[in-house]
Image (cartoon, grey):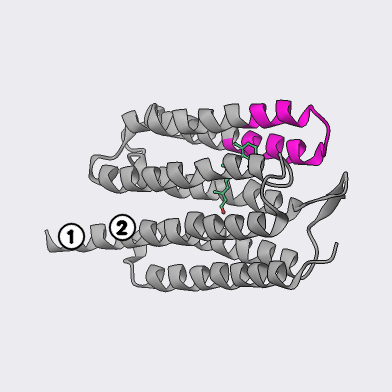
């Protein structure tokens, strides 16, 4: 499929935004004390992976035609890997360290498994919905994906909140707020875009996805690592 010049430009800007985000997050990471640097890895790779996905789309690959509509499956490969990493970054901030015996560690792993498992199914079933083209059963897959989305949010607002590390609670709460607002835009955009009702054109869809992708990855990652940085500074001062 031929991209128009404005679609190509948006995808190149997305590539640049993600690559810049990876560099900025890595740079902030180097200013953190060694024992806090593990917080940076997930956020760094989220941006690096998305930069590659955007580059693939900008250079004209990662797209299939289904019933005469383009489906950017490169997005879903990206999301399949980066959304679990985003959640892992959030959970590593929020969950209390697994000290005090095996049961605490098992509870922690169970919570991580819950949230990540539901998330992977949300993206995988969303991809199936997109590949169903004009067929009516795409809406069944869409609803299944939404159910898993709600399960992710339920995990984050419910059981995870009961196991928070007290000193990390403000940062977890801020990040969860950002994540919830931004992630709700995706299923709405899907309905309005070419995979759903086609109410907005392909260029509009590519543009809005690029903006929320950069906010949900680069913006979220910077808030996360800056939060860790200011937390460790106030610790050192105390
Ligand atoms: C789909 C369509 C089916 C219903 C739902 C969806 C949700 C997708 C989400 C994606 C998040 C992506 C992120 C990317 C970062 O760059 C698959 C669009 C619920 C929540 C955060």
Helix, strand or loop at label 2? It is helix
Identity of the residue drawn at 39% across and 31% down? 157
Q: Which residue is mark 1?
A: 234
Chief secondary structure of the magenta span?
Answer: helix
Q: Nearer the viewer, residue 136 or 12?
A: 136
Identity of the residue drawn at 69% across and 70% down? 6
Q: Nearer the viewer, residue 144 or 43?
A: 144
Can residue 195 be spotted in the picture? yes
Identity of the residue drawn at 40% across and 62% down? 222
Number of dots carrying numbers: 2
Q: Which mark is residue 153?
A: none
Q: Position of residue 192 (x, y in %)?
A: 65, 43
- Report if the CB atoms under discs 2 and 1 are less than 8 Å apart: no
Image height of 138 relative to 215, above or below: above
Q: Which residues are magenta?
A: 119-145
In this rendering, position of residue 121 left or right of residue 222: right
Q: Nearer the viewer, mark 2 or mark 1?
A: 2
Q: Determine the quadrant in which ligand 1 lies.
A: top right
Q: CA distance from mark 2 to mark 1?
A: 11 Å
In this rendering, position of residue 80 left or right of residue 115: right
Q: Nearer the viewer, residue 95 or 107?
A: 95
Q: Position of residue 224 (x, y in %)?
A: 38, 56
Q: Which mark is residue 227?
A: 2
């Amino acid at each position: 499929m031929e991209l128009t010049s404005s679609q190509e430009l948006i995808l190149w800007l997305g590539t640049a935004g993600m690559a810049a985000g990876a560099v900025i997050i890595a740079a902030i990471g180097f200013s953190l004390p060694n024992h806090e640097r593990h917080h940076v890895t997930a956020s760094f790779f989220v941006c690096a992976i998305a930069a590659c996905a955007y580059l693939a789309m900008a250079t004209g690959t990662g797209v299939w035609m289904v019933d005469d509509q383009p489906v950017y499956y490169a997005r879903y490969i990206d999301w399949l890997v980066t959304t679990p990493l985003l959640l892992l970054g959030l959970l590593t901030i929020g969950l209390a360290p697994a000290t005090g015996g095996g049961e605490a560690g098992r509870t922690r792993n169970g919570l991580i498994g819950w949230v990540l498992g539901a998330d992977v199914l949300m993206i995988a079933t969303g991809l199936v919905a997109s590949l169903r083209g004009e067929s009516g059963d795409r809406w069944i897959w869409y609803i299944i994906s939404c159910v898993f989305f709600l399960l992710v949010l339920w995990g984050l607002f419910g059981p995870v909140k009961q196991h928070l590390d007290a000193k990390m609670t403000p940062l977890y709460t801020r990040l969860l707020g950002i994540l919830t607002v931004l992630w709700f835009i995706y299923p709405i955009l899907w309905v309005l875009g070419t995979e759903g009702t086609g109410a907005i054109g392909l260029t509009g869809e590519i543009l809005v996805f690029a903006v929320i992708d950069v906010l949900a990855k680069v913006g979220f990652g910077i808030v996360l690592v800056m939060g860790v940085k200011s937390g460790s500074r106030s610790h050192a001062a105390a």
